[in-house]
Image (cartoon, rainbow, N blue to C red):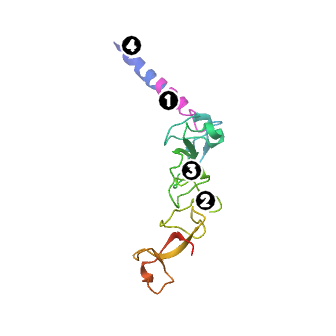
Amino acid sequence: MSGRLRSLPAVGLLAAVLVATACGGASPSDRSGTGSSSGSGATIPSCANTPPDQTVSEPCCASYGVDACGAGLFCAAFDGRKYPTCYPLHSRQSLEACTADDQCALGSCNTATGFCRSSAYEPCTAATGCVQPDQHCVSACPDMSGHVDCSSSLCDTSTCVDECLLSQ
C-alpha cells in the first residue's frame, strides 16, 4: 500500500506533462510552432494546433482557406473577436462586418467599408449603401406612410432615420 501512495505524485506529474504537451508546450521557453505571445504572457493560438474543417463557433486558421471550416462555413474574426472562428455562410446581417458577398444574408458585402449592405426599409449608411441598385440610403421618416424623405415638410425631422428607399 505504501508503494502505491509513493507513486501517486509521479502519476500526477506525468498527467500534468501530458496535458501541457497536448496544449502546445510544456514551458514558456518552448513555444516554437505553437503560437506567439500576446504580450500578456498568454499564448495566441496558431495553425499548428488548429485542425482544418472546424465546425460552427470553433477556432479556425484562415490560412487553410476553404478548408479552415466545414461545408457552409467561413473563417473570420468579427464582432470584436481577437481570434478567428467559424461562421455560417450568409449569417451576417445588414451593417455587420464582412469581407465577401457570401458572408452576408442578403449576398452583398461592400468590401470598401467592410459591412453588409442593407435592404429596403432597413437602417443603412450612405457609405455602405443598399443591396438593390434602384435604392439609396436616405434620411427617412418611418412614421409616415411610404417612408417619406426627411427633406419633406410632412416629416418630423426628430424621427428621421437613415434607411434604404427607392430612388425618385
From what the image shows, is residue 124 above or below residue 139? above
Disc assigned to residue 3:
4
Of badges 3 and 4, the one in the foreground is 3
Identity of the residue drawn at 60% across and 52% down: 101
Specify start and end residues of the magenta stretch as a single range.
Answer: 14-30
Specify the label residue 50 is tagged with. Answer: none
**How far apart in space, not on screen, are marks 3 and 2 (Cα)?**
11 Å
Residue 37 picture quarter? top right
Q: Which mark is residue 103?
A: 3
Task: Kindly report which numbered mark, 1 or 4, lies closer to the viewer in this rendering.
Answer: 1
Give the answer, above or below, for where 138 lies relative to 87.
Answer: below
Q: Residue furthest bottom?
A: 153
Say left or right for 63 vs 142: right
Asked which secondary structure carries label 1, the reply is helix
Q: Can the viewer see residue 34?
A: no
In terms of depth relative to the viewer, which is nearer, 164 or 100?
Answer: 164
Q: Which mark is residue 114?
A: 2
Q: Secondary structure at mark 4?
A: helix
Q: Amino acid at mark 3?
A: Gln
Q: Decide: marks 3, 2 in contact (CB < 8 A)?
A: no
**Element type at marker 2?**
loop
Identify which residue is drawn at 64% across, 38% down. 64
Q: Earlier in the sequence, mark 1 or mark 4?
A: 4
Q: How many marks?
A: 4
**Looking at the picture, which amino acid does disc 2 mark?**
Gly
Answer above or below: position of 7 versus 164: above
Residue 107: x %, y % from top left: 57, 53
